[in-house]
Image (cartoon, rainbow, N blue to C red):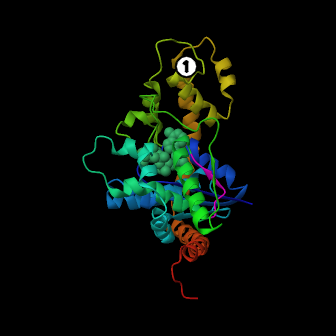
Amino acid sequence: MKRIFSGVQPSGNLTIGNYLGAIKQFVELQNEGDAFYCVVDLHALTVPQDPDELRKRSREIAQLYLACGVDPDKATIFLQSHVKEHAELGWLLQCVSYTGELNRMTQYKDKSEGKSAVHVGLYTYPVLMAADILLYDTTHVPVGDDQKQHIELTRDIAERFNGRYGDVLVIPEPQIQEFGARIMALDDPEKKMSKSAESEGSRIGILEPPERFRKKIMRAVTDAENEIRFDPEKKPGISNLLTIYSMFADVPVESLVERYAGQGYGTLKKDLVEVLEDKLGKIQQRFVQFDDQAELDNILRRGAEKARAVAEATLNRVKDAMGLVRFG
Ligand code: AQP
């Protein structure tokens, strides 16, 4: 049986990149195994957050999981900070991780670039992510392409741990889609779309109203030609729009290229706006339907209890293997 684990940071308003790269897969995979979907609030603290905003966003992401189709009767939904074993295993794994491997993490390099002061948590965050995954004896981790390096690190840490202490941790596999694993920024298609990027025009929020995302799509950077072709290297802008269109409309890119042959970029953009109005509109309606905060808290409470039971058993195995004293 597959054991699936993944999470999303409440570090900004979720984008269609987060949806297409990760959450859409969460919904599909909940039918294929025992799935744990976490709101990784401890990770969001690696950069400064407004406390009230963080609380609001953490609940909002859980509500969005539901609105996007994650079913709490099939998958376990919970907040990372509600299961203290994450932080504890994070520390234990730091003691089998090397600074050299953390120095190589590209996300750390990107996020710390040009900053005069960087929090230690930003540097050690990939080890906490390894703990998140390994606590649940995870076999599959559905993520976007940007997280590939962190999953490789998780595997390295787990293999090293098992090499030193015996067969304790399950080695996970990344589950990265072949298509749509990296949605690019609308105003700069060489960069990844990110929820915390400075430029508002770079991204579309899952909860964004059509009047806002219409302008962003119509202004999306393309190229000087007017030929609709899927070529991410030479035509990153138009290829990104085709990817988003294809994934939301569930139509292969080749069919879209055929459909829009000989037509201008403006027509494609207008039609994409309509597709997004429909698909995001449905998620937004469901989001409102799941607005009962008491019920949401119940789901999160139940989820944390279920997660804790699995996490505690793994942590005890790790502690025993490492030689920490536990009373029977
Ligand atoms: N542009 C993207 N295309 C495809 N997948 C993406 N993901 C993020 N951006 C894209 C995937 O979304 C999941 C949740 O991401 P995260 O919250 O853990 O943090 P992240 O990867 O750092 O995503 P962001 O949006 O760029 O957040 P910030 O701005 O806070 O750093 C992951 O599976 C990720 O791969």
Mark yes or no: residue 195 visible. no
- Magenta-drawn stretch contains 74: no
Q: Nearer the viewer, residue 325 or 64?
A: 325
Question: In the image, what residue occupies the spot 38% across and 43% down?
Answer: 109
Please identify the residue farthest to the right as the structure is shown.
1
Q: Nearer the viewer, residue 316 or 234?
A: 316
Q: Nearer the viewer, residue 276 or 200?
A: 200
* Whole-percent x, y for residue 328 in the image: 58, 88
In this picture, which residue range is highlighted in magenta? 137-143
Please identify the residue farthest to the front as the structure is shown.
164
State whether residue 175 is above or below residue 216: below
Report if the beta carbon of the residue with label 1 is closer than 8 angstroms to ligand 1: no
Which residue is under mark 1? 267
| Quadrant of the drawing holding the N terminus | bottom right
Question: In the image, what residue occupies the spot 54% across and 75% down?
Answer: 319
Mark yes or no: residue 48 visible. yes
